[in-house]
Amino acid sequence: MKIQSMLLGAGLAFSALGGCDDGNPDARAGVDADAAVATNPPASANGREQMFDRAAVKAKGCPLLRVEDVAASVDIAATAVRPNPALDCLYAWDGGTAMLGNIRVHGSVEAARRDFARTTEDLTAAEMQAGADSLEKRLEAEAAAGSIDRRAAPVGGALARSMAGSDVTNAAIRGIGELASHDGNRLKVLVGNVTFDLAADRGDEFDLELSRSIAQRVVRNLERL
């Protein structure tokens, strides 16, 4: 399975559970989400909660993941990494691809942690199918409204359908941001009031260690903003 479908799969979990807009703390009714906040107090820097500015995080282009970051993780020349003309933060090189996506800047650290807990819940095949249907419709609507590149909608729809019908099981992973989880297709990461997904491959399959290396660079870039 190529990386584009992996990253769209990350969006499916979000759609299947009824995602919230940036800054909106509402989440799927969930004791799990609330418990995650209660039992794991937000991390802080110098005694203060890490809060990042939405405009800086979502500036034009891809400020959190640059060609140079991908090249350094793969150990190739930056000129060998090709950005995608239709999708920001999607890169390819001979033998692999990487993408950062589903970047969300929440109104509070607590809201970010609720979102992380909600979007790293295990999903049944039926929930994934519902998410695929929802995401496909949303992409079509956004393309019609001009809010996304029209070339992205049909590609995204096809990729969404390719992820439908499979169960999703998440596992915690250490060493990336404050909290991180992976489901065998992508990483989900929490840093302060920001959550994001990342996946990379060196061929047809998700590469956890490469994804971890690139995600660590994304976290460093975020903290430098």
Image (spheres, rainbow, N blue to C red):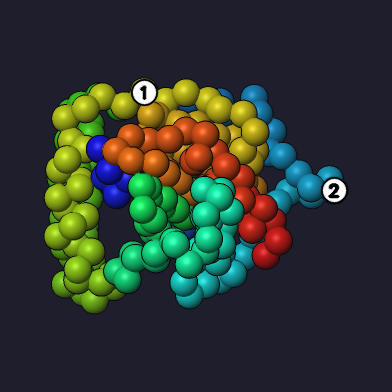
| Residue, disc 1 | 169
Q: Residue 165, position in %: x, y?
A: 16, 30
Q: Tell me if residue 135 comes above or below residue 207 in the rendering.
A: below
Can residue 147 be seen at all in this image of the molecule? yes
Q: What residue lies at 48% left-to-right and 75% top-to-bottom?
A: 60
Q: Residue 144, position in %: x, y?
A: 16, 72
Label 1, label 2: how many angstroms apart (C-alpha)?
Answer: 35 Å
Q: What residue lies at 21% left-to-right and 38% top-to-bottom?
A: 163
Label disc, if present, on residue 75 of the rendered structure? none
User: Which of the 4 quarters of the picture holds residue 29?
Assistant: top left
* Amino acid at pointer 2: Asn
Q: Tell me if residue 14 comes above or below residue 185 in the rendering.
A: below
Q: What residue lies at 67% left-to-right and 65% top-to-bottom?
A: 225
Q: What residue lies at 44% left-to-right and 62% top-to-bottom?
A: 80
Foreground of the two, 136 or 29:
136
Q: Residue 117, position in %: x, y?
A: 48, 33
| Residue, disc 2 | 46
Q: Is 10 on the left-hand or right-hand side of 40?
A: left
Comes first in the chain, label 1 or label 2? 2
Q: Residue 116, position in %: x, y?
A: 49, 38
Foreground of the two, 110 or 192:
192
Mark 1 crowd level (few <14, some 14–19, many ≥20, 10 Å Cα):
some
Q: Nearer the viewer, mark 1 or mark 2?
A: 1
The residue tagged with tag 1: helix, strand or loop? loop
Q: Hey, which residue is sitting farthest right in the picture?
A: 46
Q: Tell me if residue 57 comes above or below residue 158 in the rendering.
A: below
The N terminus, quarter of image: top left
The residue tagged with tag 2: helix, strand or loop? loop
* Amino acid at pointer 1: Thr
